[in-house]
Amino acid sequence: MTTEKPTSPRIESIGWGKMRIESLGSGKDFKLWPGGGKPWDWNETGTAHSPGIQVGDVEELVTRGCSTVILARGVFSRLKVTDEAMDYLESHGVETIVTDTKRAVQMYNDCIDRDIPVGGLFHSTC
């Protein structure tokens, strides 16, 4: 008996301030992982453009089984990423890609096509 590994939901479309995610619907920012995801609420960890993505933002991606994490910094890459978040991901052996949102969406969907357990944080504005 084989058990299928869950795949990450595909990002179907993205525009300024709006994303559409397979099986999750539409919203502004998302946190996605193999088997699911949810809207990314910056208030949960006190995230802001500066200092940026924090350990609290990426912990769930690690516990949900991501071997690759893509951090989308926004259309104009204004969202920063803390050194602590990068160190946390590295210490857990997670390949991490940090890029602008348009490129991040392409890379994320490509990882799904290649059956890589991918997750990410996606910021759809600045």
Image (cartoon, rainbow, N blue to C red):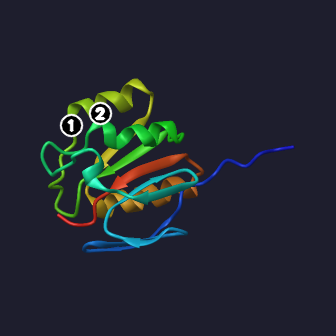
Q: Residue at x 28, y 60 (%)?
A: 123
Disc 2 is placed on an element classified as helix
Checking the image for residue 118, the label placed there is none
Query: Quadrant where the N terminus lies?
Result: top right
Q: Position of residue 19 (x, y in %)?
A: 37, 71
Q: Is residue 33 above or below residue 124?
A: above
Q: Is residue 48 above or below residue 20?
A: above
- Position of 17 compared to 95: left or right? left
Q: Is residue 28 above or below residue 33?
A: below
Query: Disc count in the image?
Result: 2
Q: Quadrant of residue 100?
A: bottom left
Q: CA distance from mark 2 to mark 1?
A: 7 Å
Residue extending farthest front:
44
Q: Which residue is mark 1?
A: 82
Q: Residue at x 73, y 49 (%)?
A: 4
Q: Position of residue 15 (x, y in %)?
A: 30, 75
Q: Is residue 118 above or below residue 126?
A: above
Q: Position of residue 70 (x, y in %)?
A: 37, 48
Q: Position of residue 96 (x, y in %)?
A: 37, 40
Q: Does the CB distance between marks 2 and 1 fall below 8 Å?
A: yes
Disc 1 is placed on an element classified as loop
Query: Quadrant where the C terminus lies?
Result: bottom left
Q: Which residue is mark 2?
A: 86
- Amino acid type for the residue under numbered disc 2: Met
- Amino acid type for the residue under numbered disc 1: Thr
Classify 10 Å Cα crowding around label 2: few (below 14), some (14-19), many (20 and above): some
Classify 10 Å Cα crowding around label 1: few (below 14), some (14-19), many (20 and above): some
Residue extending farthest right:
1
- Position of 78 compared to 26: left or right? left
Q: Residue at x 32, y 38 (%)?
A: 56
